[in-house]
Amino acid sequence: MARYHLSSYPWPFEVNLHPTAAQVLEYCRQVVHHLKLDVRLNTEVLAVERLPPAGVAAGSVCSGSSQQQPCRWRLRIAHVSAGAGGRRRDDEQEVNFDYVVACVGSYGGPQKARLQLPGEQAFLAAGGRVLTERSPEVNDPKLAFGGKRVAVVGFGKSALDMVMLARSHGAAGPVQHVFRSARWMLPRLIFGLHYTQLLFIRASTVMVPSWSHPTPTERALHSRTNPLARGVMAGFWAFLGAVLTAAHHFNARSGRGRAAVGLAGDRLSSSSGATGTGAEAAAAVKPAGKDEGRLGAAVVSVVAVAGKAPGCEEAVEKGPPAITTAAERRRRLELVLRPDERLDESLRSAVAVAPDGYVAAVAEGAVEPTRDELAGLVASKGKEAGGAVGGLRLADGSVVPADVVVLSVGSVAARFPFLPEDIRRRMEADADGAQLYRHLLLPGEHSLAFGGHSHCFTHIPAVEAGTLWLAALWRGELQLPPVSEMQAAVESIASWKRAHCLFEPTRLAGTNVRFMQYVDTILLDLQLNPYRCLPNLVAELTGVYGCSHYAGIVQDYLAARATAAARAKRAGLLAPPLLQPLKVAM
């Protein structure tokens, strides 16, 4: 929970380790009240339009501005209501602003067009269902999966969650998990320690390869020309990969990774919002257990599809098989714990924390994992498939019996239909997202920014630091480099990501596991100390950074600028020198 609150406003009530939808909703409501924010619900931004250089009519004042100055942007907004006839817009307005920050997120875009599989119509006619993780039926998993034979296609976060959702809500027989290739998963517990206690500390994140490193020490550590540095890096990542794999095996054997049955309350839904205020609100969102709530808001990753191992039909007909040999257990675990790519190549936003119980279920045969290409769907003729309505046909010609097939095939990069056409084209040009300068600005467009577009594992502190950076720019205290230099930095980062990171729709947008490098760079741009635990060196290197570590950065910045102004005044200057971003591509 240390990662899910504003740095200056900790959770005012007890929450789960992974907060639920109701808890997050209540927290947001209290933050809005505490900060007196002007939040306009049920309001759609129809368009963000540039105003001509002359601005608006003489004497007009931008919304929220205390100065008589021309505005740069006009927003056309409308109230949206839902009725029997669908969504309706009314009360359209135009509001002018100096600056605009688009905070629409990276995962709100449309889902990929669902795979249209050969044989699907016959499968559906026989009573089969084809779903995705966004299908309304999934909101009632007992009805969707209970008593049915389920096959889940894909190996992203959503696919793993759907496997365990089906298993936990009464799927008949083992859940068939089909995929073309496995991906690295993080065990929630690594020999008793939460994974963040080992992976999200500075001593570990400094080892993460990145397109840029903010300090000379980090750059030396990641030198491509120093054989010693290369050897240290190779050894570290090989060792870490072995530790993660061993932890998965340990969790499966010890039962620590087993999931509790009955996860209906874990999914985000409009009916789960808490009501009331004060003590009533805190009671409404008080968790029953700290490990609940992990299936909400699954992030969709782009994955390819695959197949089944021999014997799946028999396993489906007979129900969950007993573990007969250690060899069978090893075979199943090898399929899900031996990714094709190196660990350091898979450090992206889509890297999944293994759902509780997934690896144990694989080991026990309650989840049957297999690799192959998907060829289509087939409908059964009578009872040949043990009563199943049909199933998945694989590239090798075999069939996985299934009544319900869940296709977790991902979403597309974020869309910005409200932006001016030229900016929208730049933001939507690439399938792997939009690369921005400092992950905030399009070069040449400096009064329009993108907040929270860069996903990472300390997301809220990164957004807060980035917003402070924008405030410094728009207060006239930070000087940007030439547009050509900014564009060169953007192209350099994009090239590095495409060479070293697996594809995902947010590959260019995100900083993901490079969160320390990113936040450090932003704070150093502002001449602020990024090392928030010093002078305690042990805590700095081994402490898990959370939101509270960045509390006070606004006050630190204002104090630093006041000191710089006083120093400039003593030197006979009208103003202190402008801040200059570091000469690193970030």
Image (cartoon, grey):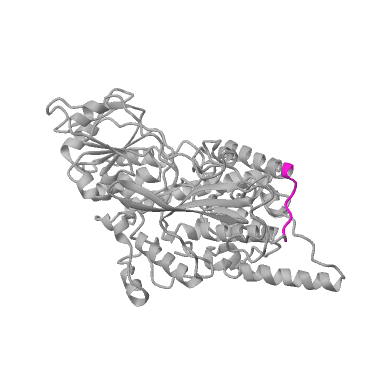
Relative placement, left or right, of 372 versus 171 is right
5 or 237: nearer the viewer: 5
Is residue 177 inside the magenta stretch?
no
Task: State the image coordinates of residue 297 (x, y, percent, origin top left).
Answer: 38, 52
Task: State the image coordinates of residue 420 (x, y, percent, origin top left).
Answer: 57, 42
Residue reaching furthest to the front: 58
Question: Does residue 535 show up?
Answer: no
Q: Determine the residue positioned at 21% across, 43% down.
A: 322
From which residue to which does the magenta span run?
A: 477-484
Residue reaching furthest to the left: 382
Task: State the image coordinates of residue 47 (x, y, percent, origin top left).
Answer: 52, 47
Task: State the image coordinates of residue 577 (x, y, percent, origin top left).
Answer: 79, 62
Quadrant housing the N terminus? bottom left
In the image, residue 2 sits, relative to residue 393, either above or below, namely below
- Figure label count: 0
Q: Determine the residue positioned at 36% across, 29% down.
A: 372
Residue reaching furthest to the bottom: 279
Residue reaching furthest to the top: 397
Residue 366 in which image quadrant:
top left
436 or 154: nearer the viewer: 436
Residue 319 in which image quadrant:
top left
Is residue 478 inside the magenta stretch?
yes
Residue 315 in which image quadrant:
top left
In the image, residue 6 sits, relative to residue 375, either above or below, namely below
Relative placement, left or right, of 463 versus 87 is right
Relative placement, left or right, of 428 versus 302 is right
Q: Determine the residue positioned at 70% across, 49% down.
A: 584
Question: Does residue 312 show up?
Answer: yes
> What's the magenta bit mostly, secondary-structure-wise?
loop
161 or 195: nearer the viewer: 161
